[in-house]
Image (tube, coloured by chain):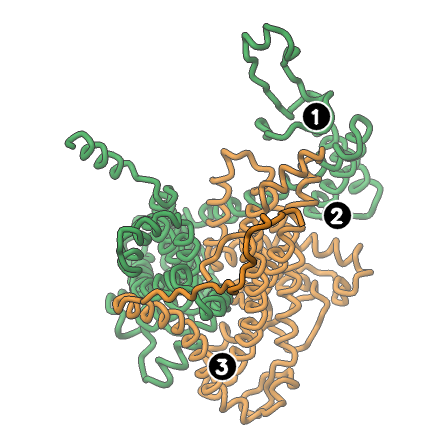
Chain colours: A orange, B green
Amino acid sequence: MAVALTPGQPPATTEDKPRVIVAPVAFGDKVFRGILRSAGLAVFLITGLILVFLIFRAATALRAMGFGFFTTSTWFISTNQFGIAAILPLGIIAALFALVIAVPVGIATAVFISEYAPPRLRRALIALMDLMAAVPSIIVALFAVFFLMPRILGFDAWLSHHMAFIPFFRFRLPNYGSYYANATFIAAVAVSLLVIPIVASLSRQVFSQAPQGEREAAYALGSTRWGMIRTVVLPYGRSGMIGASMLGLGRALGETIVMSFILNPSFVFNYHVLESGGNSITVMIANHFFVAGAKEISALMAGGLVLFVMTLIVNTFAAMIINRSRSGATASAD
Amino acid sequence: MLTHDPQPSATAEDVPRKIASPDSAAYLATEAKVHISQVTPEGAATLAGSAFGALGLVWVLYERVLPFSGVLGFWLMWYAVFLLMYAAMARMQWDAREVSHKVALVAFTTGGVLAVTIVLGQVLFVVARGLQDALHVAMWTQSMAFASPLSPLSVGGVLHAIVGTLEQIGLGTLFSVPLGLLAATFLAEVGGKLARPTRTIVEAMTALPDVIAGLFVYALFILTLGMQKSGLAASLALAITMMPIVARASEVVIRLVPGTLREASYALGSSQWRTVLNVVLPTARAGLATAVVLAMARGIGETAPVLVVSGVTKEFNFNPLSGPQVSLPLYIWEYAHIEAVNATIVTRAFGGAVALIVVVLLLFALARRLGGAAPGELTRRQRRRLARHGARA
């Protein structure tokens, strides 16, 4: 009760109601908004069409196999013994390993660019990160097969000899180079090169939005730069980092070219990532589509459908997390 | 590295400050500039010392004492030991907070430098391998129609694939940019209940598996509508992968347009569509052009969607509407993966990669050139025109 009314003033009797303001929308604007809104709807329409037509074309294979499509690990089309029981988890393991490498490197790069790089270099580094995102996956695939693969075999052997206490790194084949080549681990390293720029550029955007006032407050309290990053930037960017990692997972799950260049397709589920083998739905599509008959195409469509639904779910969650973290930071139009 | 650092470090010893006492008249007279630098002899010596110390220690341990081998493992171990030694040496001189700051600085800087090295490294490696082919005039002027697998590099080239790539990306841009721009304008200018789910779906579509776009086009246009495998089908698949990229990047740019410009336009009595068309989009023009070119650069490198729907040929096909039409990524895929029967063929694939990198870099340089200006910032030509008009008035 800090404010005292003057004694002579009559008490307010009529309730204050905000006046409802209705701005008439001009006809031209109605048409304009209608066009824009239909463009927004078209995005949903395309996503829906992809789903509908994949289901439509996958129907033959799914009818032939039923639920067995998810429990069969062999790929014999003519005898109706095909499924994704081995292919799908093999692809997921490769994607997860790619993420294990890409997320720390990507976030470190983002912190470096947004917090440590000299301001004069920052713009060039951001451009370079964009460029890295635009490096075609086929270039990465060439690099991975002809440069990385011959050089990483020694490291693979090193991992299998000294890190075998981690079950993933157990190696049960003879200790020859060719048994290490074409393995899931090598594919994961190569795919991580494609995921790093996604994680880095999205996290960098979130980091750069960390409020300036709080940064200065941290410095004013005597914090070092690392202290400021740890207490202001990283907590602020947490949901952005999670979202970026999930989008990276979506990218890794859908990577086709690099995986099919490197892997030596196998149809047995095997979580020992150093052993030659590995597979994924995308590899099956890339390697078999040219030579496939009608029924196999239907089977590949069914695999594509599973992949589409899976990545759509992962990506949508990721996008929701990123958008939530972003909406508080900038004044959005909605 | 790290010459100009705006933050004073926690300890005063390693920061040379050239300030006279503020009370003295000399201080007021000279206005000595405060120069804060974090590169000190102690700091540099600590860094170099721990780097060389770690190298020595790891060499002894790795090569002589422990039963390890492998180059990559050696350098990984060197990096870990280097960070540990650096932390220990720093702890001997500075307090704990300073040490954590310095270690974080070194770790993040090396991480950033590593990422940059990887990008440049992979591009340089591919270019170095591909130059063998790219230095032949034939590569840039011929198709593969008259080259057998045993032909030398002086016969046969990638021109047919360059033609295919340019036509497909042109058509793909034509299909994807209008829709992407409209969707972006919707997200940034109209908003409403529909905007949030649309933005989520657009964002999700940017990371969609690219091979799915190819499968979809195959299922709808080739199997259902009876189209042939052709350049047009490939460009439709590219459009589906490019559209969300255009939409997302353009929305960010449109949002950067200052609200005061819109309000000024409304205050002058213009309607929303006039405001958007005459004020918002022209202001964001440079950024929108960048968004489009970036999407083109991404689309050009897409192999998986094209792989499924465009078909492969060794000959020129200028008509995107009929017959198979090969593009650069598919050419590389073909010669590095499917038909890689001898070293010459693989070199041809690397030559195609050089052509692809050249095209992507050209587009990228164009994007930087177009998008160098922030919204509202004038180009040199616009400034000249303004100056001319100003002089005349």
Q: Is mark 2 on a helix, strand or loop?
A: loop
Q: Residue at x 35, y 61 (%)?
A: B181
Q: Position of residue A87 (x, y in %)?
A: 62, 76
View extreme (right): residue: B65
Q: Residues within 10 Å of mark 1 (few under 14, many from 20)?
A: some
Label 3 sits on residue:
A301
The nearer-to-camera label among 3 and 1 is 1
Q: The disc labelled 1 sits on which kind of residue? A: Gly
Q: Is residue B43 left or right of residue B337?
A: right
Q: Is mark 1 on a helix, strand or loop?
A: helix
The circle drawn on residue B69 is 2
Label 1 sits on residue:
B43
Give the mark, 2 or 1, whose residue is nearer the N terminus.
Answer: 1
Q: Which residue is drawn at 33% across and 53% down?
A: B280
Q: Residue at x 75, y 42 (%)?
A: B80
The circle drawn on residue A190 is none
What distance separates the C-alpha of mark 2 from that of mark 1? 33 Å
Q: Is residue A209 visible?
A: yes
Q: Where is residue B272 in the image (x, y as percent from the top left)?
A: 31, 60
Q: The disc labelled 2 sits on which kind of residue? A: Ser
Q: Is residue B210 visible?
A: no
Q: Could you say which is closer to the camera, residue B140 or residue B388?
A: B388
What distance separates the C-alpha of mark 2 from that of mark 3? 45 Å
Q: Position of residue B253 (x, y in %)?
A: 40, 52
